[in-house]
Amino acid sequence: MSFFKNLFKKSAPETPTRELNHVSKLIIGDIIEFSDSFTLPSEVRQQKFEVIAIETLEFEHQHYPRFKLQGEQQTYVWLSLPGHDHNNFQLSLELTREEVSQLFDLDLFSDVFEEGFTELPSLQPVSLGDWHADRYYQQDIATVGYHHRTDFRTAAPSQYADENPGQQFEFYHLHDAKENKLIDIMVLNNGDTDVYLTVQLGNDSITGYWPIA
């Protein structure tokens, strides 16, 4: 982490030895800095993060990279690039069960996994720059996907379930009225459940890139 710590002391990116001008080009060891916009969650605003892992989420019709980012204060967030719009990306914060219970009524939250559920309100007031919204609406329910701890940007993972090396999960997805703030839920085949608050961001949310090489 010495490389990472040294970069935090610098006020501006140095001349890159490798062209890095978009999140799709990130590799392990690269560092990005988020803007000072108050629409960004406070945990990332004006903060630098290092890419410490690159994974792949695979669905029937697409697969895309997911970057694990570590901040100077040991804050961890996930940056992903679903779809084909290279002008936007998603930033996610994983929640503990206690955090889920603070934000939502757990009885209502459990209904997210039932067919026909449509709406989930937040128990906490929403202010500018928060991760969460005041109300969510269901979109995807029990969509099958595979989690790979491998970067498949230059190769495709297996398309066949009996050959697929990834860990299977069911994906549940909710969004707010503007589709800017999301809840992403992954129920793994071992029973573990990962819950993420996700925000949609544009490329202008990143103000600096520091390539590792």
Image (cartoon, rainbow, N blue to C red):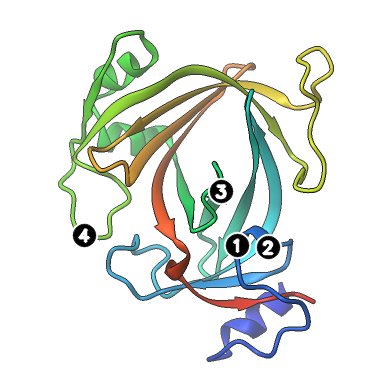
Residue 141 lies left or right of residue 50; in this view the side is: left
Q: Where 14 sits versus 89, above or below?
A: below
Q: Earlier in the sequence, mark 3 or mark 4?
A: 3
Q: Which residue, given by chain and number where applicable, does mark 4 sit on? A: 128
**Alpha carbon distance from label 3 to label 1:** 9 Å
Q: Amino acid at mark 2?
A: Leu
* Label 3: few (<14), some (14–19) or many (≥20) C-alpha neighbours in 10 Å: many
Gap in angstroms between the C-alphas marked 2 and 1: 5 Å
Residue at screen point 28% across, 54% down:
130
Q: Which residue is mark 1?
A: 23
Does the residue at mark 3 contact the one at mark 1 (Cβ under 8 Å)? no
Whether pointer 4 and pointer 1 mark residues with C-beta atoms closer than 8 Å, the reply is no
The amino acid at mark 1 is: Val
Say which residue label 3 marks: 80
Q: Position of residue 210 (x, y in %)?
A: 65, 78
Residue 26 - label: 2
Asked if the residue under mark 4 is in contact with the one under mark 3, i.e. CB atoms within 8 Å, the reply is no
Instruction: State which quadrant residue 14 falls in.
Output: bottom right
